[in-house]
Amino acid sequence: MIPSCFPPLRVPAWPAPLALALAAAFPAAAQTLPTVVVTGAAPPAPTTPLEQPAASASRLGLSVRETPASIDVVPAEVLAERGLRTVTEAAQAAVGVTAGDFPAEPSAFSMRGFANSQINTLYNGIKIGPPNMTSRVMDTANLERVEFLKGAASLMSGEGATGGAVNFVTKAPHRGPVRTEVNTAVGSFGERRVSVGSGGTTAWQDLDYRIDASASNSDGFVDDTWQRNRHVSGGLDWRAAPGVKLFIAGEAKRDNGSSYWGTPLVSANAPGVQPRGGVVSGTYTSGFNGSALGPVAIDGRTLRTNYNVQDNRNAARETWLRAGGEWQASDAVVLRTQFWRYTADRTWLNNEITAFNAGTGLVDRERFYVGQDQTSWGNKTEWQWDARVAGLDNRLVAAFEYSDLDLDRPGAANFPGDSVSLVDPERGRYGLLTTQLQTTRIRNTVLALEDRLRLTPTVALIGGLRQERIALERSSATAAGVQRAGFPYEKTWNPTTGRVGLTWEAAPGTTLYGQYGTAADVAANNIFLLGATQPLDLTRTRNAELGIKQAFWQQRGEWTLAFYDTERRNVYAAQGGQQLAQAGALKSRGAEASVALRPDAQWSLWGNLALNRARYEGYNLGNGSSLSGNRPPNAPRLVANAGVGYRFMAGVPMQVSASVRHVGDRFHSDANTVRLNGYTVFDAALAVDVARDVQLTLRGRNLGNRTYAAWADPFYPDQILLGAPRSYELALRWTL
C-alpha cells in the first residue's frame, strides 16, 4: 500500500501546445474539428492505492484489493512526491523491498529472501530475458507506476518469478484535456535532470496521445564515476469504432556510465588500514586470490576510491515498439492482442573484481568484457469471457503468448589481472581486447487460463494454470570460428505452474484472502554466461499466503497485513566467479504490514514493516562442509519505513515531509561469514508553491551522512557497494 502524501497540482486554463502541433500535423482533421484547449479542469484524483490496477498480478482486471496476493503499486504521484528518481529508489516505497545498483545487474531487487534472477523484471508486462543480464539503470520520469508482486508469480510472467516480479509501466495516453508537466532538478554529485511530458485528447477527438522525454546526468559520489540517461517514450490510442481501440507505442532509451564496482573488503588489522566502523563485520578468505583477511572492514580512506580502469564502459541502447488493440465483441466477450519488438546492444568493459591481498597490501584486479546484441519479438493475445456458470458470476481469461529472443555476444573475454595500491591506485587501461562469439536463442510458448468464480456476492474463487515451453539453443566459438567443447547446446523445459486463491469481502472495503501459488525457473538462470556443463535444470517453488486489506475512515485510512511461507527446491547458488553449488531448498517465512492515514487535507502519515526468516536446507559443498541453515545474500530480517507530511495552508502554501528507513543486517554471500550491518537513514523535504502550478522542492537524503553497505553481489564477494552519503536536491515542477 503506497499512500500519496499530497494532492495533485492544479491544471490552469492554458493552451495545449502539443495538441495544436498535432492538429497542424493532421490538417484534414483540423479543418473539420475545433482546436482543443485546456479548460482548466483538474485531472481526476488518483484512486486509493488498494483500488489501483494490478496488471502484473492478474489478467482478470482486478484491483490490488481484489487480488489474492501481496502487491505494492508505486504510482507516479508517489515517485514525484518522494523524489524517487531511479527504479532502485522506487523500491524504497514498497513493503520489505531492497535494491542495489550493481553495474552488472542494475536494478537488482531483493524481497522475501529472494533476489536477482529469482525476481522477474517486466516492462509493460513483457519479460525480455533474465534480469541479471537485461536490466538497466532507468529513471522514473517516464513511468506511470511500478508494481511489486511478491511470492511465486510464474502464472503471469513465467519462468524466473520464484520470488515475485517487478513491472515498470510507461506513461500512456488518457482521455480528456491535454496536460503538460515540466520537471527540472539539480543536486549533489553533479546531478542534473530534466523531463517534459504531455498527453490528452487531440483535435481529432478519437485520438489520444502521450509523449515523454527525460534526461539525467550524475557524476556519482565515487571518484571519476558518472552516469548519463536518455529516455523518450510515446504512444497513440485510437478509438477506431464503437468497442474497438487500437494503439501504438514506442520507446528509445540510452544509458552510458563510468561505473563503480564496489569498495574492497580489507583486513581490519592490516598496516595503515583505518577501519570505518558499523559498515561490515566478520571474517573472509578470498576465493579470487586465496588471501585470508581475518576480521574484515571497509577502509575509511577508500570510501570514494574508484578501482575501475580509466577506459571502463557500461552502456546500452534500447528500443521498443508495441502495437495492438482491444475489441469489445459483446457485453460478455473482449479480445485483446499486442505485438512487440525489442532491440538492445549492451557493453560491459570494466575491472570487475577488486580483492585485497593481505600478503602484499595491494588490491588484485581482474577485467571482464561482455558485448551483447539482442533482438526479441512476440505476441500476447487474451480472450475474456464473462458469463454465469451454475447460476454464479464468472470471468474466464484464456491467453496465448509467444516470444523469440536472439542474443549474440560479439565479445566476451577475461583478462589476466594486475595489482594496484589500496589508497591511491594507478588505475591503468583495459588493454588489448580478444573476442569470441556466443549466440543464444530462447523461444517461449505459453498457454494460460485464469478464472474468477463468485461463490457469493462477497466470496470469490480465483485460480489459474500456465503451461510453458522453453526452448534454448546456444553456441560458443573462438574468434576463429572454432566451436568450444560442449557446444552447440540445446535443451527444452515444459513447466506447469499456477495459483489458486480465495477472497472474502467481509465488509465494504475489507478483503480477507488466501492463496497457494507455484513457480519454476532455470536453476542457473544466467544462461548467457554459464557453460553447458553447469546445471540448467528447473527449480520449483511453492508459496502459501494469508492476508487482509482494508480501506476505512471514508477512504482516509488503509492497512494491509500478510503472512507467507515459501519454499524453493533444487536451488543452485552463486559461489563467486560464476560458479554454482547445489542446495536442497531455500525456505522463507515472514510477515508484512503497512498503514497509511490521511486525516485531512494537511496531514499524511504512513509506515510499513517486513519481517523475514530465510534459510537454506541441504546445502552441502563438495569439500564436505555445509551451508545449511545459512541465510541467502542481501536478505534482511527486518525492513521498516515511516513517514509524515504536513501542508501549511495559510500564507505561502508549502509542505514539509520527513521519512526514516531501516534495513537490518544482511550477509554478502551464502557462506554468511561477512555481515552487512544494518543501517538507518533519514530524509526530509520542503516544497513551496512559488506561483500557481509551480512548485519548488528542496530535498535532503541520508541527512545523518551514514556510511553503510547497500548491496553485495555473491559473484563478486571481495567488494561491497556502499550507499550514497548525504546529498541535496533542488527541484522545480511546472504544470501547464
Image (tube, helix red, strand yellow):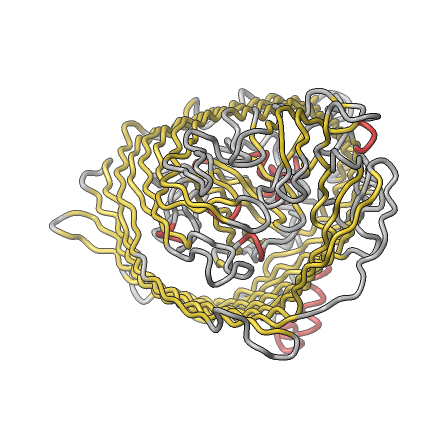
Residue nearest the observer in this picture, 623 or 315: 623
In the image, residue 499 sits, relative to residue 695, either above or below, namely below
Q: How many marks?
A: 0
For the point 49% across and 48% down, the residue is 580
The furthest residue to the left = 390
Pinpoint residue 33: horizontal percent, then vertical percent. 61, 69
Can residue 27 be seen in this snapshot? Answer: yes
In the image, residue 458 sits, relative to residue 521, either above or below, namely above
Q: Is residue 172 left or right of residue 150?
A: right
Pinpoint residue 70: horizontal percent, then vertical percent. 41, 37
Can residue 192 be seen in this snapshot? Answer: no
Pinpoint residue 91: horizontal percent, then vertical percent. 57, 38
For the point 64% across and 24% down, the residue is 281
Q: Can you tell which quarter of the image residue 71 is in?
A: top left
Residue nearest the observer in this picture, 615 or 292: 292
Q: Is residue 677 left or right of residue 214?
A: left
Pinpoint residue 425: horizontal percent, then vertical percent. 86, 42
For the point 47% across and 54% down, the residue is 525
Q: Is residue 241 left or right of residue 495?
A: right
In the image, residue 572 sits, relative to residue 513, either above or below, namely below
Q: Can you tell which quarter of the image residue 592 is in?
A: top left
For the point 44% across and 25% down, the residue is 593
